[in-house]
Amino acid sequence: MTALLRLIGTGGVIAYRALFNWTTPAMFVGTLLVGPLFQLFFFAYLGRQLGVADDRFYIVGNAVLAASVACVFGGTMAVSNERRFGTLGHVLLSPRSRTAIFLGRALPYALNGLLIAVSTLTVSSLLLGLRIPVTALPGLLLMLAAAALACGFFGLTLGAIGLRFRDVWLVSNVAVALLLLLTGVNVPAAGLPAGLRAVGGVLPITHAAEGARRLVAGDGFGAAAPALAAELAIGLGYAILAAALLKLFETESRRQATLETV
Amino acid sequence: MSEHAIEAVGLRRTYRSRTGWLRPQRREVEAVRGVDLTVGNGELFGLLGPNGAGKTTTIKMLNTLLVPSGGSARICGYDVVTRTREVRRRIGYVFGGDRGLYDRLSARDNLRYFAELYGVPGREQRRRIGELLELVRLDGRDDDRVEGYSRGMRQRLHIARGLLHRPRVLFLDEPSIGVDPVAARELRQTVADLAATGTTVLLTTHYMAEADELCGRIAVIANGRIQALGTPAELRRHADGRRVLEVEAYGVTDRQLAAIRTLPGVREASMDVVGAAQVLGVQSDAGYDVQADVLRALDGVRLGRVTARQPTLEDAYVAIVNRVAEERPIEAVAA
């Protein structure tokens, strides 16, 4: 059991340092902290101009969404950078559980996402004057953590696709655009066609953003709990999907010789 | 304990690829066409062959990275297709070149990560990593990022990584490629030390001197099949009854080389480029003195040193590989 926890914990952290491109201070601050903040300001001011929704809608929604950047691209890097460094073959030669190796990799990205979401919410609330009830903070933290975890596993699912398709960045870029459009963060879900709303319902962020807005509105944890449960269920679903895809694509790569040249 | 560390019977691998969407074109390449091989426990075995001969594909099938299209293979008695986890616990894999390491991490952190992946118990990791860093002479630079390492240092780190979990079988796929002579010598010493401690080593290399010095037995693979197998001395017999003429020259054309190949008594002719010079190697039947004919064929070409010598393992290798290229039958050599 200790060995398994070491593989997930220590292994995950070392893999994060080895494979995540944005760990340098300049890249981390610029890409992960400042970038989402300006995106939030863009939609908040656009919302004010168009009168679609108030600041709270955009601030809370975009703060939750901010957790996704590190997770989606991090999950992709967790596999595609293995190809870049030529280490994928050595990882796949490990006799240990693939599920533990790769799911452990999602956790540092989820923590990273949580940090970014908290930072984005704090800074944007201070700058745009949003008041958040103190009693909502624990629930809000939980909601952001659930969103970050779900995004971490979503990112890993995209990374798993990288075992089969080399152009996985295409998938990540499309995924980020879909999260922006379909999670109800910037476009109210009611304004989307039913089909797109259904797709948004199975993406991470959607339920967490809804729950976080309820908490900030002062509706209480009871009102937000179903959204929290839904977000956690979505996260679990992606964890299972990622594990299944990793297994499938690894088996296929041994048969089809689709791995990197090692 | 299984009698053999490595057993392969009729091992085959076909690569299938498809290009284009509207008019897809399918291609099949038979990389390995029925390899039979046994390597004993503790043996240092060489697998030689030209580029594209099937060496790396064979190793990838033996180390579970590729599923064979046909035949079977066992490592320490475990089937490489159905018992992958057992096989992976018992093997190490080292390949040559700059890649295969996490550049942003130090040597120590690279080893820490792979120690987790390869199941080295936590309480043993620190000691084991320290031992290996000392073995490959990286202690002192162990906390530097790998991106600043020379190729020789990277190569030594590859070996340390391959040995982390004390594998019983070590696959070394061209480990000395691009390594300077001093580092290559150190590498050979490390490999020899490993074999002396009972680790089975399967080595592929393009350097005949390396194979000659290290390997107890050598298989020459070409065109996806084992073409000859034996001790270095036995393989040298493929060039028995021949002698070798080496001519240093400047400006030999392909046409002149082709003409030399047709001279009476000439069995093989090949050309290497060494610095600004070309070195023409001509193998001939021992009964023929081809020197005068060869020099006549090189009329007009500036020549340097001309020497005649006995054939080496490399000459035997060239003879075997060239025969395959010409699709001539290979004479059997006792193992």
Image (cartoon, coloured by chain):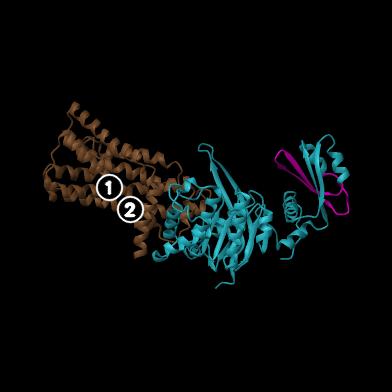
Chain colours: A brown, B cyan
Q: From which residue to which does the magenta span run?
A: B261-290
Q: Examine the residues drawn in magenta and state their main secondary structure.
A: strand
Residue A217 rendering spot, x and y as whole percentages = 12, 41
Q: Secondary structure at mark 2?
A: helix
Residue occupying image coordinates x 86% and y 46%: B291
- Residue B293: image location, x then y, percent: 87, 43
**Number of numbered tags placed on the structure image:** 2
- Mark 1, secondary structure of its residue: helix
Q: Marks 2/1: CA distance?
A: 13 Å
Which image quarter is the N terminus of chain B in?
A: bottom right
Q: Is residue A246 left or right of residue A224?
A: right
Residue highlighted by disc 2: A239
Q: Is residue B180 above or below residue B119?
A: above
Q: Is residue A155 above or below residue B226?
A: above
Q: Amino acid at mark 1?
A: Ala
Label disc, if present, on residue B108 of the rendered structure: none
Most extreme residue toward the bottom, as rendered? B1
Q: Which mark is residue A148?
A: 1
Q: Amino acid at mark 2?
A: Ala
Which label sits in the foreground, 2 or 1?
Answer: 1
Q: Considering only order in the chain, which callout, 1 or 2, is on the residue closer to the N terminus?
A: 1
Q: Quadrant of the C terminus of chain B?
A: bottom right
The residue shown at (75%, 49%) is: B326
Classify 10 Å Cα crowding around label 2: few (below 14), some (14-19), many (20 and above): many
Residue at the image point whose x is 35% and y is 39% from the top: A27
Q: Can the viewer see residue B49 in this picture? A: yes
**Are the numbered discs 2 and 1 placed on the same chain, yes or no?**
yes
Subunit ID for the residue under disc 1: A
B274 part of magenta stretch: yes
* Spot occupied by residue A182 in the image (x, y as percentages of width and height): 27, 39
B233 on left or right of B100: right
Q: Tell me the crowding category of disc 1: few under 14, some 14 to 19, or many 20 or more residues within 10 angstroms, Cα based.
A: many
